Amino acid sequence: MKKYFFILFLCFVLTAQAQNNPNVDNKFRLAQSFEMAAQFDKAETLYRELAGLQSWNYTFFESINRVLILQKKYKESVELIEARIKDSPNDTGLYGMLGTTYFYSDNLQKAYETWERGIAANANSFITYRIIANSAIENRAYEKAIEYLKRGKNISNDPFPFMIDLASIYAINMNFTDAASELCELISVRPDHLATAKARVVNYITRPLAAEQTIHSVVNFVRSKETVELFDFLAFVYFQSGKFDKSLETIIKAERKFKGNGNTTIVFAQESFRNRQFETASKAYKFLIDNFPNSPHEIYAQLGYAKALEETLNEKCNTLTEKWKPFTLPKVLFPNDYEKIINAYNTFVTKYSTNASSTEALFRAAEIYRIRLHELNKADSLYNLIISNAPLTNYAIDANIACGKIALLQNNIDKAKRYYFAAESNPRIDPAKSFEAKFLSAKTSFWKGDFSTASEVLKSLLRFTSTDFSNDALELSFLINSTKRDSINLAKYAKADLLLLQNNYKQAAVELKTLGDNDNLFIINQFAKMRMAEIFISENNFFSALPLLEKLSSDEKNAIFAEKATFLLASTFLYGIGDRDKAIQTYQKLLENFPNSIYFDRVRDKLN
């Protein structure tokens, strides 16, 4: 192997030196240009001239052979390579190249014989088998490549590269059973390459039949040779195949069989949580809590268990919530279950009061009170506890923003503004949270009728275009700057907007109807109609919303909400009315009229 790579290195150096010669270099470039222009005969002539000047130069030799193959001059290619082999009879690469020529000329038997000659020239070197196997792979002779790799694997002291190559070829040919067997064998021989085997599986596990074959193969291998790494690999394959409970069963079995300390379980639980498999994560955390009470991971398991239960319940709530609607009246779902989770967080805080994770537990309990149970006073007290005890944490920033939202629901705009300013002033705040705090602060100024201050703050935010609130900031800025001279009607709209936030839809509708019925207001009129349509949808009054949305989506003179209205119109047809054909037509209309729409990906998914 060293000799082979030394020859390649020497050829590279000599070629580099040769190309320092202006005449040789220019001629070589000209030959390459002819080749690129498909003038192969001219390229061949120049390459042969160069090879005559420097017969040792492998680059020139390889270039001649390449253009001969392109011209289908297979006989000349054979003669060229055979002549080279006479000078270098142990150069395995030459036999691989010659076999390829025979392959191109459809003389498969001769190709196989040539490759065998190459192996015979260096039969005791494992690199020989990989070089010849690569030639076979290049010609899609996969069965021969597998044969050569197996032979090389048998004589090699390090079968690792052969196992990897074999696994890849098996996977290419959809033989996932043997691919998995090779990877299992690799793990059993080289446990430190478990990560490599996992990476290989990820490359093909989603292909048809791959998961079933891989699982079957790994299960059979593990039965015959049980190791920690193989159990880990089996659990990984189950997980990647979507069989999360089977994956957890395997983890638990390995922990018990090999008398583990919970390390594998905590890693599995955290990975499950990251992949939003909350139910599986909660089971894993519970197993760790019950079976490893003195583990250093116990604190993370206790908190993780509560978080996983919460997220499982949140997903259950989300399935019962009409998320397609612009806004819905708050509902309390599963209050007893959420109270149990709050108790778990409180227990954690009491037990681990000095641990930094207790702040997260407090914050999550506060979020449940605010978002799920709508017990605003309890939520507010917990948020303020976080602000007092952990002022320089990200949780304090989020707590200030949450307290501001509670203050708005309680119609205390000045108090809300103070909380947003406190969040914005926190030295630990990240750009996204800073944008949110500033935007909400601008909205408080807007609701108070201080349109100049709101406009100035929004102006500073419009430089950022990739945050969650960018479109809202742009929309509000447009409204203020376009209608600030009509401060009386703008104040009426601001009042209605705040009432909507406070879930007072009836009173908001009264204010908005006055503005929506006055076509002379232009911009405010459009905003009011859009909000009215959203209120109708929230109240399931879809047939009142449809004419408003249809007019907004087709109004060419005032097309402020054309794109947004079209999307909401399609969603109303789909989810509200249940008219799939109308929904499809409207989604298609949106794609046609707004090719760069911010809804593009969502619309495409809906159509699919």
Image: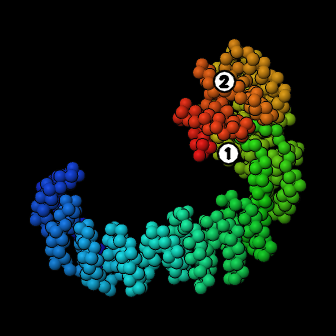
Query: Is the C-beta separation of discs 1 and 2 under 8 Å?
Result: no
Can the viewer see residue 521 in this picture? Answer: yes
Q: Residue at x 59, y 70 (%)?
A: 212
Q: Which of marks 2 and 1 precedes in the sequence?
A: 1
* Residue highlighted by disc 2: 551
* Residue 143 x %, y %: 39, 75
Relative to the observer, which residue lies in front, 150 or 589?
Answer: 589
Relative to the observer, which residue lies in front, 107 or 44?
Answer: 107
Of badges 1 and 2, nearer the viewer stands: 2
**Dot 1 alpha-carbon crowd within 10 angstroms: few under 14, some 14 to 19, many 20 or more:** some
Q: Which residue is drawn at 72% across and 80% down?
A: 256
Mark 2 secondary-structure assignment = helix
Number of marks in picture: 2
User: Which mark, by number, is residue 429?
Assistant: 1
In which image quadrant can residue 482 be found?
Answer: top right
Can the viewer see residue 413 in this picture? Answer: no
Relative to the observer, which residue lies in front, 589 or 224?
Answer: 589
Name which residue type carries label 1: Ile
Relative to the observer, which residue lies in front, 356 or 324?
Answer: 324
Which image quarter holds the N terminus? bottom left
Position above or below: 78 against 447: below
* Residue 456 x %, y %: 65, 27
The residue sitting at the top extreme is 520
Q: Is residue 277 left or right of residue 410?
A: left
Name which residue type carries label 2: Lys
Q: Which residue is drawn at 25% across and 81% down?
A: 117
